[in-house]
Image (cartoon, helix red, strand yellow):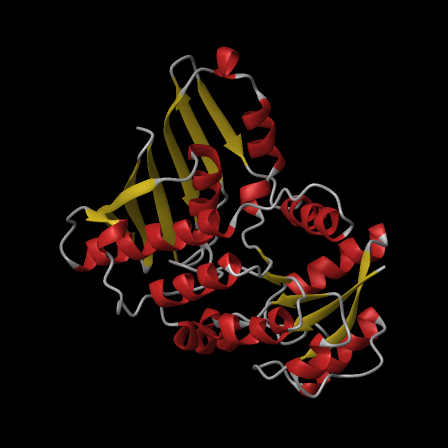
Amino acid sequence: MIKIGVVNIDTSHPKAFSGYLARTGRGRYAAVYNDSFRTDAEVAGFMRMNQIEKRAGSIEEMAGQVDIGFIQSCNWDNHLKQALPFLERGKPVFIDKPIAGSLADCRKLEDLVAKGAVILGSSSVRYANEITDFLKIPEAEKGQILNVFGTSGVDEFNYSIHIVEAIGGIAGAGAVSNKFVGSAEIGGKKCETFFTRFSNGITAAYNAFTGTYQPFEVVVMTTADTYHMRIDAGKVYEALLDRIFDYMEGKENRIAPLGSITESIRIMLAGKISRESGGKEVRLCDIPADDPGYDGAQFEREYAETANKNLYL
């Protein structure tokens, strides 16, 4: 059985993943390290839930005891340093979404993979059954993809990265540019629209809705038809974890290459720069090396204020 070491239990994902582990028996949470906003009582509750006997005193200690690390901190600015103890010991690591929040961190992660590190991630929606079923349809039947449109809700980056990764999974790698199109706002609820171009000629648009949950909707227009998908969010974790454990068990690696995942981050960084510059089209290759990106510490503070304090009790 695959032994997992989890770094921080900030979000609902560690609990949701526990259900998959209990049901399938493919792995177990064997250790936990927590230095985030969750209390000692919550960590103890998570340990009882997963029959973990000892709380790790450091990530380094835990990395030596497990087969894979799961980085599940909501502050994406910490993901890289939290992953390093596993990678330095030759262990693979899963980094939950968003895998990073800046161009600098994307490049550092890419450099680690180029040197042999195994980094798995990130968004479960990329692997949704509805998307993988669509991709299985022969091109002769479905036509060639021209445009992909997607929707997301809750917040600008932490949640909208799901739909951007899903679009990348459909359109393929090779995003060239992103552009902020405009927004609408009523009662503190805002919908922002972005337009992305890919080198293969495909275009995409996505709506990032903030202030409330919105379902993941995907519409694909091809040369032959229009395909509409509402993603079943209740099944996406299984689709992701199946791929992680397939890899850990020596089967085919069906996780997207890191470059495809970090390209989604670049798309959103370019969109943010475009919005801040009045809506000009921004090429991904023109993102400044020192661009600050999205502030993970600020997001963690905001997330902690509204997080369910009884999630692990």
Q: Residue at x 57, y 81 (%)?
A: 36
The answer to whether residue 81 is above or below residue 198 is: below
The residue lying at 63 percent from left, 76 percent from top is 309
Residue 304 is situated, as x and y percent measured from the top left of the image, at 51, 76
Quarter containing the C terminus: bottom right
Please state which of residues 211 and 81 is positioned toward the viewer in this rendering: 81
Tell me where residue 123 appears, x and y as whole percent.
54, 51
Task: Using the rendered view, name the quadrant where residue 236 is placed.
Answer: top right
At which x and y percent is residue 220?
A: 43, 27
Image check: 44 left or right of 154? Answer: right
| Number of numbered discs visible in the structure rendering | 0
Above/below status of 303 relative to 186: below
Q: Is residue 281 left or right of residue 58?
A: left
Q: To which quarter of the image does residue 298 belong?
A: bottom left
| Quarter of the image where the N terminus is located | bottom right
Q: Is 70 in front, or is 271?
A: 70
> In the rendering, at what x and y percent does residue 20 appear?
77, 53
**What residue is drawn where x is 44% and y is 40%?**
168
Up the image or down, 67 lies above or below 212; here it is below
Q: Is residue 236 above or below residue 86?
A: above
Seen from the viewer's position, the closer of residues 175 and 211 is 175
Task: Identify the residue at the far front of this view.
Answer: 115
> Relative to residue 191, is residue 171 drawn left or right?
right
Task: Name the residue at 68% across, 71% down.
Answer: 6
Left or right side of 196 for 157: right
